[in-house]
Image (cartoon, rainbow, N blue to C red):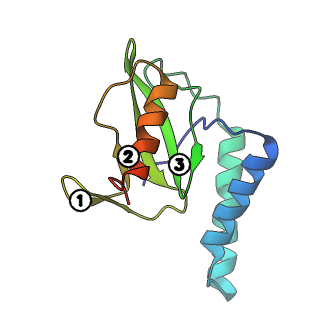
Amino acid sequence: MSAQIDTDFASEDRARAEIGAAVRYLLKDATGRARDEIVEGITALVRDVASAPPAPENPLRPSPMSGVAYKTFLIDAYRRDTDRWRATIRRSNGKKIRIAFPPAVRDEATTSADAITAEKAIEFAKRAIDAGEVI
C-alpha cells in the first residue's frame, strides 16, 4: 500500500480525527508486546515525517480536491495534463473495493473519463459510487 502525501484536510480537527482512526485501526485486537511494537512503530513514523524535508511539489499530481470524504470512500483528484483531471476512489478504512466493470478487486479505482476541472473529476467519482460501479 502506498502512503498518500500532502492530503488536504478541512481542518486540523479533521486531520487529527483521521490520525486517531488510523491508530485505532492499527491497535485493534493487539495486546501486550505486539501492541507496544505497534505504538513504537507509529511513534517512529511520526518522528520520520516530522524530521523529513518538505516533499517537492509535483505539478501533475497536486489538487485542491484531495481527500474528499464521500459515503465510505475517499476521493482524490489529480491532473493528468492541462485541463485533464481524473479521480481515484478508495475506501476510507483501507479495505479493498470492488469494481463492477470490468469485474475486479483493487485498493483503488480511477475514473475512466477526463474532466476539465478537479471538481468535475470528483463529481464523476461520486456518480460512479452512486451508480454502484464502485462497491
Identify the residue at horizontal 56%, vertical 35% (top origin). 66
* Relative height, residue 46 to residue 93 (above, below): above
Identify the residue at horizontal 23%, vertical 59% (top origin). 104
Residue 58, given in percent of the width and then of the height, sits at: 48, 22
Q: CA distance from mark 2 to mark 1?
A: 15 Å
- Mark 3: which amino acid? Leu
Q: CA distance from mark 1 to mark 3?
A: 19 Å
Q: Which residue is mark 1?
A: 104
Look at discs 2 and 3 and give the one toward the viewer: 2
Residue 75, given in percent of the width and then of the height, sits at: 50, 43
Q: Secondary structure at mark 3?
A: strand
Do the residues under discs 2 and 1 have CB atoms within 8 angstroms? no
**Around disc 1, counting alpha carbons within 10 Å, would you say few (fewer than 14), some (14 to 19), or many (20 or more)?**
few
Q: Which residue is mark 3?
A: 74
- Mark 2: which amino acid? Ala
Residue 20, given in percent of the width and then of the height, sits at: 73, 61
| Rendered image quadrant of residue 32 | bottom right
Q: Which residue is mark 2?
A: 128
Look at discs 2 and 1 and give the one toward the viewer: 2
Do the residues under discs 1 and 3 have CB atoms within 8 angstroms? no
Q: Secondary structure at mark 2?
A: helix
Identify the residue at horizontal 62%, vertical 70% (top origin). 25
